[in-house]
Image (cartoon, rainbow, N blue to C red):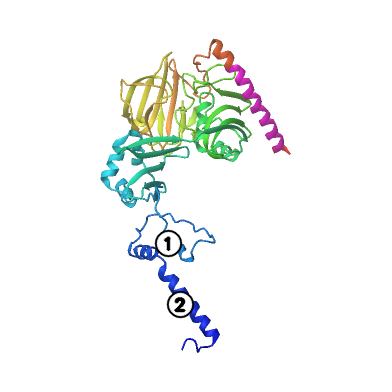
Amino acid sequence: MFASLPAKHRFLIAGLVTSLSILLLIPSDPAEASKDSEKTALEVGKRYSLAVPVATESLPQHAESTLPKEDNSLEWLQVEVKKGDNLGAIFKRGKSDTATMQTILDSDKLAKSLTRLYPGEVVEFGYNSKNELQELRYNVNNLKTLVVSLKDGKFVAKQLQKEIETRTEVVTGIISGSFWASAVAAGLNEGQIIDLANIFGYDIDFALDIRSGDTFSVMFERQYAEGQFVGNGAILAAQFQNQGQTYQAVRHTDGSYYKADGGSMRQAFLRAPVNFRYVSSNFNPRRLHPVLGTIKAHNGVDYVAPMGTPIMAAGDGKVIESAMKGANGNYVVIQHSNGIVTKYLHLSKRDVKKGDKVKQGDIVGRLGATGRVTGAHLHYEFVVGGVHRDPRTVKLPQAEPLQGVARVEFTKQAKQYIAQLKAHERVTLAASNN
């Protein structure tokens, strides 16, 4: 019958039989693997590595559907911290348990940084082929990464830090309106503005003395890791032109700031006991009292700031009064050396008591509206030998300057820094006038 068929049909049948025979001889392992893969449910939330098929002449077409052979590389699961999360919930989403979490926390104090996570941050869990946690990673910040690894059955924590490249930058600003807005426009951030005010805080009352047209130049560090900007470093040098007076400061290796000639920037007293804000009333011996409506000496400076603003001790001393009384409201009086007394009135809260010793910058109370006032503010008085003096202009004793070799080396570096500041300021001011 087969022989009676046309030659064309006989050829097709022979080819079909040959193909079927070859298929029957192929081992069935790939098919079994495919069945197993269909029966195995992939875990939700777990990341799986997939081998990229490589096309070769000898590779059968059906090999593209074959699951790759597991290797020893870790599979990573990233868990993003959400608002309201606790560490237990994060570990649960990371396919780990609270026992493992506690073991990791107990492994090293470095691991305690895991208890200070913020929404948006990511914790990575690395598992081996047996689905056992082998490593955990958490970027503490732009520079530091916490790595907790399982070694010999124990979790070991270490902190990796990227190599930092430090560059210097100089910015110059001209004050137009508020100092804060002008500093931001020049390229300084909030922290740098506060630092700059603190550096010159012994010479300039930033709440009262700043004038439109004043200028400032600042040299500071910028830090990079792997070519990416990660943050600002310290202010290296700064110059401030205030009401025709030039003030300069350069950072020493000890972290303190000195004048360009090595003299200390630090003085026995701060010009203002509160971070700079708007001042409602200046020192004036013949001021119309806002409550009484009569001429009454205003022997101090009034600082308006938000209720509860911290009030600092202007200098080292001893608290001789801390009470609530009449027009003063809550008030604190500090006795300093050389017959100097400072007074802080209308506080919402007193943080020191009579007899306490305080250091310059210590918090003595919080700004308020107690006593005879029309609104929340601090009334600050500076008394020398029983006579009220204007705290902005009174001459204050200086701290010790640098000495010997340290001063020689410092002034050499300071000269270079100041020259760069002046050059940058000249260029900036010239450009602004064009």
Q: Tell me residue 324's x, y (percent).
A: 31, 30
Can residue 282 be seen in the rendering of this structure?
A: no
Q: Is residue 222 above or below residue 14?
A: above
Q: Of tags 1 and 2, which is closer to the observer?
A: 2
Q: Could you say where residue 134 lies in the image, as x and y percent from the top left?
A: 35, 44
The answer to whether residue 411 is magenta is: yes
Where does the magenta region start and end?
410-431
Q: Residue at x 39, y 65 (%)?
A: 27
Amino acid on which disc 1 is placed = Thr
Question: Toward the viewer: 124 or 189?
Answer: 124
Tell me the chief SS of the magenta region: helix
Q: Looking at the picture, which amino acid does disc 2 mark?
A: Val
Residue sticking out furthest to the front: 3
In the orientation shown, which residue stands out farthest toward the left?
99
Residue 203 drawn in magenta = no
- Disc sitting over residue 66 in the figure: 1
Q: Does residue 302 appear anywhere in the picture? A: yes
Q: Is residue 428 left or right of residue 304?
A: right
Query: Residue 373: where, in percent of width, then height?
Result: 40, 36
Q: Residues within 10 Å of mark 1 (few under 14, many from 20)?
A: some
Query: Badge 2 is on which residue?
Result: 17
Element type at mark 1: loop
Could you say where residue 120 lies in the image, as x and y percent from the top left?
A: 42, 49
Secondary structure of the residue carrying numbered label 2:
helix
